[in-house]
Amino acid sequence: MLQLFRFTTSSAARLLRERFSCHQSDPICARNTGLSDLTTREATLSLREDDTDTNDNEQRARIENFLNSEHLTYQKIRLGAGFSTPGLDRTSIDHILFADQLEGESILDVGSAQGRFCIEALRRGAASATGLETSPERIRHARRIAEILDVRPRPIYLHEDVEHWTAPAKSFDRVLCLNVLHHLYDPISVLRKLMFIARKRLYLEIAPVNTKGIFKVTSFFTSWLASNAPVIVLGNPKDTRRTADGAFILTPKTLSIIINGHTQAFEPVIIHRSSFKNRFVIEARRRQINHLVVVAGVTSVGKSTFIERLKSPELRQRFGIADRYVTFFCHDEFDKLAKGPIETLVFHYDLLRPFDRPLQSHGRDSALTLLSSAEKITVITLFNSA
């Protein structure tokens, strides 16, 4: 009886073995078995190559359709297959933003646009990346790009205005705010918010002062001085549609005073030059204090004497203080405090410090912002019982 078999290339080897099986003891059959296996392997390999070509062609078509159907600007992102989104190549800033290991870190990018920096952070090992963006179109583009590149884990893009959005203290390890501050109506408030949110580092890319505009109403020397002094330049465009183009311009010196003068939670800022439009990148690293021991009391109560007595192992053990520690007095200059990780910091603090000046409360004393940079805090309060 004649039997007809319908089978695909992928099932050919199975059916051949079922219909024409033989024993390895048969020398003829043994010789033909090797040939059959080779033919099967070649057929399977050819099928896989065809599937790969098909997938590549489909991916290429998806990318071309995306690029042709969307209005893409601002950030250049490589999509594969030789395609990139139209925009500026920002790879030159990566060595500043991602100079060290990002393994396991959480990233926030304020003004994330098409998501270029969120994607790059995840590629470098970040555990999560969140982008804030006011443009719904850019958020849609960013999500589509992440799908095309199959970024894992997926970045999270939020349609939010940073001036009205908030997050818990130290909720992101690394915060990026690139070319955003000069578009805000209250940049100082946002800056303080981002400092509050950043657990490890804060990066700000800022526009330079337009000295040509200042030179029109003053001397060249004054315009040069303004770009290097702690000043804030107020924009006043005639076209109201461009109000947020440069509402406030903050110089690097201005930002360093706000970050290192108005608070003490961060190490002295590092100022980098950006290759993008002659701008600056301000890098602020939060102080890394494992155990902060605050020795507090009113003036002349014996704080310095107590700190001197901490040389005794028994007294250190009583308060859980490590044998090696750094001592710092609140009247010292904070920029002299050691950079990098500090295992134990003993901090001399006068409780009367805010009350002979306009602070009038401990909550407004910038010295106490140091507490926000500690993992563990011990407060030892001294008082005179007489």
Image (cartoon, helix red, strand yellow):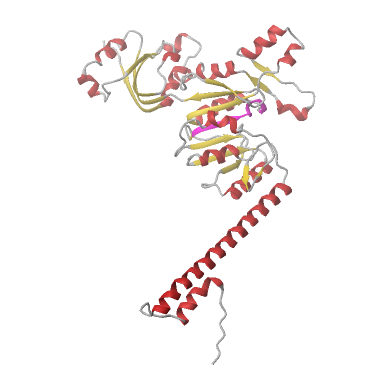
Residue 162 occupies which quadrant of the picture? top right
Q: Is residue 365 visible?
A: no
Is residue 307 rendered to the left or right of residue 215? left
Residue 306 screen position, x and y as percent: 27, 13
Q: Is residue 290 visible?
A: yes
Residue 369 screen position, x and y as percent: 45, 22
Residue 347 occupies which quadrant of the picture? top left
> Vertically, is 80 above or below 217?
below
Is residue 64 rendered to the left or right of residue 8? right
Give the residue at the far left of this rendering: 314
The count of marks equals 0
Q: Residue at x 45, y 38 (%)?
A: 103
Residue 78 screen position, x and y as percent: 62, 42
Q: Which residues are magenta?
A: 173-183
Q: Nearer the viewer, residue 353 or 195?
A: 195
Q: Residue at x 26, y 23 (%)?
A: 319
| Magenta stretch holds residue 179 | yes
Is residue 251 rendered to the left or right of residue 125? right
> Vertically, is 310 above or below 139?
above
> Vertically, is 109 above or below 206?
below
Residue 203 occupies which quadrant of the picture? top right
Q: Locate the C terminus and report the quarter of the image it occupies.
A: top left
Q: Residue at x 56, y 82 (%)?
A: 5
Q: Nearer the viewer, residue 186 or 195?
A: 195
| Magenta stretch holds residue 7 | no
Give the residue at the far right of this rendering: 238
Residue 65 screen position, x and y as percent: 70, 51
